[in-house]
Image (tube, helix red, strand yellow):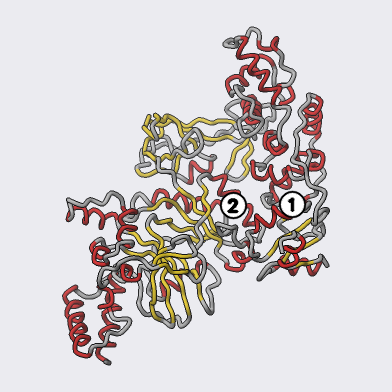
Amino acid sequence: MDRMQELCEILNRWAYEYYVLDNPSVPDREYDRLYDELRELERETGTVLPESPTCRVGGEPIKGFERHTHIARLYSLDKAVTEDELSAFFTRVEKHGAPSYTVEYKFDGLTVCLTYEGGKFVRATTRGNGTEGEDVTAQALTVKSFPLKISYPGTLEVRGEAIIRLSALEKYNEAHPEEQLKNARNAAAGAIRNLDPKVTATRNPEILFYDVNYMSENPVSSQEEGMEFLRREGFKTYPYFKLCKTFEEVMDAIDEIEIGRKQIDVLTDGAVVKVNEENVRREMGYTDKFPRWAIAFKFEAEEAETTVRNVFWQVGRTGKLTPLAEVDPVELAGATVRRATLNNFGDLTRKKVAVGSKVLIRRSNEVIPEILGAVSGTEHASPVEKPAVCPACGSPVAEVGANLFCTNEECPPRIVQKLTHYCSKNAMDIEGMSEQTLTLLYEQRNVKRFSDLYRLTEESFRGLEGFKEKKISNLLGAIAKSKNIPLDRFLYAIGIGGIGRVAARDLAAFGSVGAISALSFEELISLENIGEITANAILGYFSDEENRAELARLKEAGVVPYAKERKTEGAFAGETVVLTGSLSLPRSQAQELIEEAGGVCLSSVSSKVTLVVAGESAGSKLEKAHKLGIPVIGESELLARLGRK
Ligand SMILES: [Zn+2]
């Protein structure tokens, strides 16, 4: 018995060195010799220790998969594909203090959950629908990148991604010409979800662990601690792990991953950004589908390599100078790409982009692809000079952080860009009013302000090239139609700094431009999607005399945006409510019900708030409510007032 224990210990350590650390300390035959000795002893004594490596052979084929309920739900992640979406996530998180973030690779395989009790491995399940998965213990046992015995004494569920390395896939395909596996993701899923564990074993899947999903005692207090815990207990984790403080650091890490993933042996489709601190996670909670404290940044599949030939500067509607690169023509997503952008001047140096450098470009949702970074060979490249004056109007340039701005409010391309944004589809949706037409109207008809659009007549277009009667009447019709527009679109259209479509919807809840212009700083930042910088931009916008005059001119021209009527009757009429802690119904649904019953929901507690609904394990918001003497009700009273109980 002692010898068996000793053998298990030695063999498991060697397997750990081999499969988890990729750093074997003994030759295979040495391992095989002791393994045979152990198996012989097991046969003689008729006992097999639970941590014995002989448990890993997988056993007989099974008839079907049993369903199993996870101890804690395995959530999936909300997705972002643009930097804007990611930045909206940051705004929401930063309302809960200044946490740190972790950035990791997002592997593309099959998610599995491993359960341990009293230090022993008991079960492996697939994620399934998050609540219930399939028991794949026999299949997972053939994978050697996790321990059968751990030191943690309580009940534990950890999560990992079952993957097949690209090199292992290639090897498999060479050995099985009659049965080619097309891609690594399906191969991994097919291996784990195969009724015959022997088939699982031939495909050589691995599991990379990245999450502690449940701990019955002494839970970890951060993602960083969770990863350390996993490594300490002998689970295989991927070495890349970045702890970041700022949005910029996170974006850098994402770029690193996007370039790095071309070189690694595992299939990836994105990066995962998580709030590191457990207490912030608890405070933010979950939507009905996703944790609010994590997001997956998904890479678009379409990327290509090309060479930068020239860089010039575009002036945007805020005056920001954006570098635009001319690149060697390259096929990307079915189109020939000749130009690619970067965010700002800082990006050029940070991503080592110069004239002559080879770069990786990605086509995202924007029309013009983005440069992700230089891939190699910048020795012959010549750096791009920082423009001293605006290339469009010659005015001095101001440097704010990594950005350069033209300081001239009347800079021509800037005016045209403002108008173009105003007319765009998600804004006022004035169909047919392209950048080209607006440039023409600016240059030849002095159209500078939004309100100038509404004084255009048929006469205004006469003599402009390319404008026939039909086109003119369509344009005038589209302009007239835009006078009747939802308030959130209008707020987005006028281009207040930092107001995207989501924040615009938040603001539109106040019913009118007048009501919004009267909001205080505190009221603004208490909105879910508005941070301090944006709040200041809104205050600045409405205190500017020219802006106020322009809003008056628009109103006079008949542009009167409408808001959805706010209910003034119901159980929550006149109440300003904050929800905190976890409720049995999704928070978004609770919010909707309260709003339907005449209430307004805010995300943070201030003296404006008249009622706090505290669910289970409510934290700092509840404390603050007590401090301010705001009435607090629990979930049962909430449901009762909503007439749902
Ligand atoms: Zn300029």
434 lies above or below 521: above
Q: Residue 595 carries which label?
A: 1
Residue 560 in the image, given as x and y percentages of width and height = 77, 31
> Of marks 1 and 2, which one's residue comes earlier in the chain?
2
Q: Which mark is residue 89?
A: 2
Residue 252 in the image, given as x and y percentages of width and height = 49, 51
Q: Is mark 1 within 8 Å of ligand 1?
A: no
Quarter of the rendering containing residue 314: top right
85 lies above or below 455: below
Q: Residue 544 carries which label?
A: none
Mark 2: secondary structure? helix
Q: In the depicted view, which residue is nearer to us: 400 or 268?
A: 268
Residue 593 in the image, given as x and y percentages of width and height = 71, 54
Q: Can you see residue 431?
A: yes
Quarter of the rendering containing residue 57: bottom left
The residue at the far bottom in this view is 2
Report the residue at 78% width, 51% height from top: 598
Q: Label 1 sits on what residue type? A: Glu
Total marks in image: 2
Q: Kindly report the distance in space between the C-alpha atoms of the residues bearing marks 1 and 2.
A: 23 Å
